[in-house]
Image (cartoon, coloured by chain):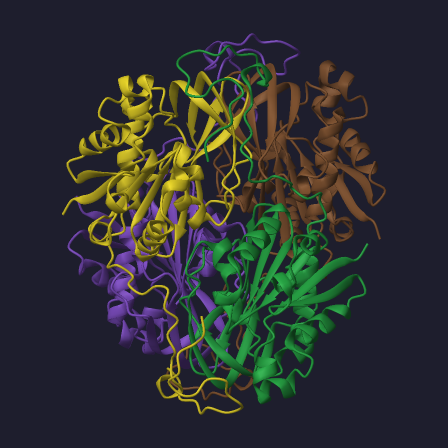
Chain colours: A purple, B brown, C yellow, D green
């Protein structure tokens, strides 16, 4: 069964800005989805901000294995209810790939628990993504680095939690560095952040970036059964303890009573 | 200069429940603060839910090096504004020590980015905290394990992010295990979770638990200057790039314009 | 193409000790290999200490995707040359699964860089492996814990480096705990340690342990091309620097000269 | 009581190479020790390869809190016995700071368990160490980056285990990046690697590098009692189990017998 990817796009710059529209006439989300479809084992659909529930109703997330997220200008317009819904699906096992300016999206900040801030400069300079861990699945098929001819600089400090793995580190012509590819786990869900992808440059048309995206979708997919009710805190009654014990001492909760939250 | 600790207590069980009141007649927060004061290099004050702004106005957090958090029944009554304020201070460098049922507090879930769920049983059983990393500062002065005669069981899976360090793992008479002491970093702030501390047992009167709390406060204290504006995303103008570059290609932002959030 | 697993067994207890021989008449290595073969996507062969080069000549390691290691009594008899050869293959991408008393094997200590010591007791007590991360590939198909009716106790502190992931933690009837399943990465190779497997109990005949072993082989397999010459330190001549620079200042090395090691 | 630092220097280039001798007329080890002595809470001594036991007899290591290591040309001349002795002291709690070309020293490879290889170029280019984690103790007092006017390039991939913390990442004029400051824990010992320090440039005379070295010594010092016998694997007899159990089933070891190694 193919991996079901869903590409979420804010879809504002593409409509309002002539430069972006020329590069991505069908929107960045469609360019990304097309890149994913070059792997026959991935099906890719899209969703955008302006759709009802931002295109992310519960039923659709139920049928999504990996969600990719590109947003920039309108992070604040994404409703908190949808953010919580997506976070919950990540904890249950859906993969999440956050792209470029998505570092400041509500969903990324929600699952990181940190500011996710950074430095930036839009000067069309050269970027080189160095592969730190050559045999990481997300680096499959790449050379020792990927050169991006024109990019927006994202500079350290990038205030995210210490990652599980640093996959890419970027060099910029203007003198900065950035951890441009990192992984984390949140509940049953795998999270990957990839920094290149500024909307005024044709970065998602670059073959190596497409390769990274396909690799990342395959990596982020967790084929195990969904971890339902992962936020429950079940009581284990004394009589069902794995080892036989007898209850003693004072109690706060009456038998069978639910815990406080 | 001593480390300025602030112990936050929900202070409900102590007033409403006779069993808890007998063990902690001055409230759990005061018992914890007293344990901290046994180290002359720590000053300990308290704050509680019912105070204005829950006792955590901005000015007070400004003068706090390490915040300890015990809550259980009324997590939902803590206002979101105070939670965001505390999270911000953690990112700036304030230490945060979350105790027992605080695993489900808004602030802990906020900085973890995960459900923080677990299993539980209130049967007064025996717990043994095994020291995983004997020379960790938080384990200073302990033996190879700490025995808690009567405890509430907290069982795995504990749905937190993979920790920076696992300091303690607990054994329970009823057959479960739990990672009872773990560390994480969030921005400039150090976070420690410690699980023993159920309100119907005199756990915070136990000398070894007091020792752990004092150790944890010393560990969580970051003496470096506060990282102000850690959630800013400053622009680095082209003319201020560390290496001389010339801007090229199309632009989204006019020169000097702030980034989107 | 199936994953090529190779099970290395010391094969001494099985020949010299009647109790062990009765449980594992064909040797523990064959019991383990048989458990692996229940997955049709794995081929499993065996190698033992007494074979020439301990059954691990270079050509054989070249055709091995994942190596499993069980040793106990004769760690010191494994030649250093074979240990270095195996370590090199791990760095190049071969998976390594170290079992039970293999914690003190030369190869495990070699890739960990720590003593790998622990506490132990052989009393036939009950062990319960709790699954920490339910959706980890190594835990696929398991319930919330695996009960081992009779086991050798392995107790903390287990002096290994902080793991990438803690997959299992064990509870013992006698009161101790142990991180019984952990992962690390070394170069391109994935390393997993699994503690149950004492030779005087039929643990490798237990279906859930077989399931864990099959899961671990699938997890440890890195399908990417072998990272040859991973221990080389190549010079990048000035004229081949990604950015054009001119050499300046004093030099230690003449142009084209190899670095010191 | 001050922290007792010991700076180990290979002390060959300084004697054999006129360029290096001019920069470090008293040897690099003495330049480093002098930088450390600017902190009154640190005492700094030196040891060199040519001394008996390389200046590292057991009695001296017993009185060392933090060892700094600079070697390059003669890694192979350090005896294995001294390497094992140093590794053992690290596990017991001595800090270890490995400098520049020490990435290929026996002791660093010993405690990492990986090749520790990298790319390099000696072109006197510019390096910029970016501070990833501004409030890490090792970064105390630094600005957002440290500029090294002339350096040897060290490039990724740097084949070390995933670090506990990435403190610095370097940018190079020629286009590469490098994780130039990382931490790990090995047993009770803290390990820090710092890459700048090529012998033909006056890098250890640079004030910010001195600041980093002093910070690192303070960070690496573990004041807790030495973890003696950390590589022992003690038996816990059945009658001394924390919980009362009765031994059952077959046994390999007679009561009181030592385990195999």
Residue D34 quadrant: bottom right
From the top left corner, tell me how far across and down residue B155 is, in percent.
50, 26
From the top left corner, tell me how far across and down residue B156 is, in percent.
48, 29
Number of marks present in the image shown = 0
Q: Which residue is painted at 44% across and 17% down in the image? A: C126
Q: Which residue is painted at 67% across and 58% down in the image? A: D66
Examine the rendered structure and indicate whether residue A209 appears above or below residue B28.
Answer: below
From the top left corner, tell me how far across and down residue D205 is, in percent.
67, 80
Task: Judge by depth and name the residue closer to the eye, B139 or A191.
Answer: B139
Residue D235 in the figure: left or right of residue A144:
right
Examine the rendered structure and indicate whether residue A67 appears above or below residue B48.
Answer: below
Is residue D164 visible in this depiction of the protein?
Answer: yes
Task: Judge by depth and name the residue closer to the eye, A109 or D209.
Answer: D209
Residue B74 in the figure: left or right of residue B61:
left
Residue C136 quadrant: top left
Task: Judge by depth and name the residue closer to the eye, B169 or A84.
Answer: B169
From the top left corner, tell me how far across and down residue D111 is, in percent.
51, 54
Residue B158 in the figure: left or right of residue B4:
left
Is residue A6 visible in this depiction of the protein?
Answer: no
Q: Which residue is painted at 71% across and 43% down in the image? A: D225
Examine the rendered structure and indicate whether residue A209 appears above or below residue D114.
Answer: below
């Amino acid at each position: 069964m193919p991996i079901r990817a869903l590409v979420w796009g804010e879809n504002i710059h593409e409509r309002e800005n002539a430069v972006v529209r020329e590069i991505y006439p069908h929107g960045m989300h469609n360019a990304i989805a097309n890149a994913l479809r070059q792997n026959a084992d991935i099906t890719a659909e899209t969703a955008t901000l302006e759709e009802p529930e931002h295109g992310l109703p519960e039923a659709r997330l139920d049928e999504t294995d990996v969600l990719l997220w590109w947003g920039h200008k309108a992070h604040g317009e994404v409703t908190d209810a949808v953010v919580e819904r997506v976070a919950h699906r990540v904890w249950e096992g859906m993969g999440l790939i956050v792209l470029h300016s998505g570092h400041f999206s509500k969903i990324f900040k929600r699952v990181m628990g940190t500011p996710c801030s950074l430095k930036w400069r839009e000067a069309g300079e050269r970027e080189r993504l160095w592969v730190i861990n050559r045999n990481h699945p997300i680096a499959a098929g790449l050379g020792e680095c990927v050169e991006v001819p024109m990019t927006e600089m994202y500079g350290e400090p990038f205030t995210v939690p210490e990652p599980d793995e640093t996959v890419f580190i970027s060099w910029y012509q203007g003198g900065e560095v950035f951890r441009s590819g990192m992984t984390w786990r949140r509940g049953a869900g795998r999270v990957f952040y990839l920094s290149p992808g500024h909307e005024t440059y044709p970065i998602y048309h670059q073959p190596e970036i497409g390769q990274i995206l396909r690799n990342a979708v395959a990596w982020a997919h967790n084929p195990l059964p969904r971890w339902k009710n992962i936020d429950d805190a079940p009581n284990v009654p004394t009589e069902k303890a794995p080892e036989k014990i007898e209850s003693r001492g004072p109690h706060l909760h009456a038998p069978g009573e639910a815990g406080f939250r």
